[in-house]
């Protein structure tokens, strides 16, 4: 979500071209007052909102109903259903949900501390013990999700946020837009290809049915980055990247890993296993000797911070380029729709 903007509550139309989300709010408007904008997507705007009775501030995702296709609506129903089910200190919580004539409103706890990786690169001292503590926190949160029959399916740095800007801010996993839950029979065999390149599990790339194990793979990639500052699988060519992932082709470069404990590397090798049946579970991770070790090195991982700064810069550049391309695609689509409407009007006049 990120930091808020200075736009006033009930302000002008957002850049998405939607009508004002504050108009005709019904039940939502009785309980919440919309405030500054935090961000936006193609069909939604994220705004701050104040709960009128308590004065507490939340983040509200305002989704235009007329922008949703049938599959979009089904995905939203899944997201809300999953988030209502989950209640864990390290997961972003859905506080409330409203369905109004023009908009859906998802009221969530607000994250004002930014992304975890951005906080790490600001540190002057970052140790293996700190990395271990973060890994333990993330694994425990995913263990809880899996115990509830939920698979996240899109774990990545952008979805690991901090509750506030204090030194000991709580780490929380966000964005359950791709999450799925097991059926009444306790089955969870998924086939839809989803996730983010670089973090996606090999079984998804191979087109095989998959389950909770895909989250563990993504955690393994994140753990690797937390320890050395860059991902285990990287290539500018996406096809080559996917081949490396499917082969489990990664290494521990001595220059960056010789000062990391052998137990940490052992954990990574037990997570980044191509065969999901042989991959660790979240519970296994929490029982691993490195995660339980009370005497980890306190050496400052200076090289990791340097590498992570470079990785963060590349990541943000790619995100900016993708945003530009998305806007361009939307503009092309709108021009095509406008041209089609003009042709239809001309034909009607003829």
Image (spheres, rainbow, N blue to C red):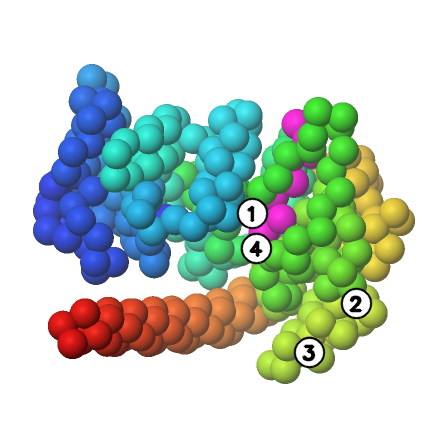
Q: Which residues are magenta?
A: 146-155
Q: Position of residue 265 (x, y in %)?
A: 79, 57
Q: Which residue is mark 4?
A: 156
- Residue at (83, 57) in percent of width and height: 273
Q: Position of residue 312 (x, y in %)?
A: 48, 67
The crowd level at tag 1 (other Cα within 10 Å; few <14, some 14-19, many 20+) is some
Residue 280 appears left or right of 317:
right
Residue 246 — which label?
2
Pick the front one: 175 or 76:
76
N-term mark: 2 or 3: 3
Disc 3 from disc 4: Cα separation: 20 Å
Residue 239 — which label?
3
Disc 2 from disc 1: Cα separation: 21 Å
Residue 149 lies within the magenta run: yes
Residue 178 — which label?
1
Q: Compared with residue 267, is residue 83 higher up or lower down, i.e. above or below?
A: above
Q: Compared with residue 68, is residue 105 higher up or lower down, i.e. above or below?
A: above
Disc 2 from disc 3: Cα separation: 11 Å
N-term mark: 2 or 4: 4
Disc 1 from disc 4: Cα separation: 12 Å
Q: Quadrant of the C terminus?
A: bottom left
N-term mark: 3 or 1: 1
In this view, the mark in front (3 or 4): 3
Looking at the rendered structure, the secondary structure element under dot 1 is: loop
Q: Are marks 2 and 1 in contact (CB under 8 Å)?
A: no
The crowd level at tag 4 (other Cα within 10 Å; few <14, some 14-19, many 20+) is many
Residue 82 appears left or right of 344:
right
């Amino acid at each position: 979500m990120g930091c808020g903007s200075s736009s006033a509550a009930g302000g002008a139309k957002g850049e998405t071209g939607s009508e004002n989300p504050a108009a005709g709010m019904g039940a939502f408007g009785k309980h919440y007052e919309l405030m500054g904008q935090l961000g936006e997507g193609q069909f939604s705007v994220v705004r701050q909102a104040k709960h009128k009775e308590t004065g507490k501030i939340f983040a509200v995702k305002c989704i235009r109903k007329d922008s949703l296709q049938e599959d979009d609506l089904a995905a939203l129903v899944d997201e809300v259903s999953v988030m209502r089910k989950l209640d864990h200190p390290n997961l972003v919580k859905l506080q409330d949900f409203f369905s109004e004539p023009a908009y859906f409103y998802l009221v969530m706890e607000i994250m004002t501390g930014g992304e975890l990786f951005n906080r790490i690169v600001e540190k002057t001292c970052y140790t293996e013990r700190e990395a271990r503590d973060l890994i333990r926190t993330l694994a425990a949160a995913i263990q809880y999700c899996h115990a509830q029959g939920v698979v996240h399916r899109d774990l990545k740095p952008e979805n690991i946020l901090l509750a506030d800007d204090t030194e000991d801010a709580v780490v929380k996993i966000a964005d359950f837009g791709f999450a799925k839950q097991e059926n009444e029979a306790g089955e969870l065999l998924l086939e839809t290809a989803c996730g983010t390149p670089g973090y996606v599990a090999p079984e998804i790339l191979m087109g095989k049915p998959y389950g909770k194990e895909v989250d563990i793979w993504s955690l393994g990639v994140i753990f690797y980055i937390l320890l050395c500052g860059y991902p285990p699988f990287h290539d500018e060519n996406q096809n080559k990247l996917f081949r490396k992932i499917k082969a489990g082709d990664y290494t521990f470069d001595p220059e960056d890993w010789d000062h990391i404990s052998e137990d940490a590397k052992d954990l990574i090798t037990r997570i980044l296993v191509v065969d999901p049946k042989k991959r660790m579970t979240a519970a296994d991770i929490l029982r691993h000797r490195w995660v339980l070790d009370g005497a980890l090195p306190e050496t400052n991982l200076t090289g990791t911070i340097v590498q992570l700064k470079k990785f963060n810069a590349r990541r943000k550049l790619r995100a900016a380029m993708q945003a530009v391309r998305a806007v361009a695609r939307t503009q092309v689509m709108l021009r095509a729709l406008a041209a089609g409407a003009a042709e239809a009007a001309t034909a009607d006049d003829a």
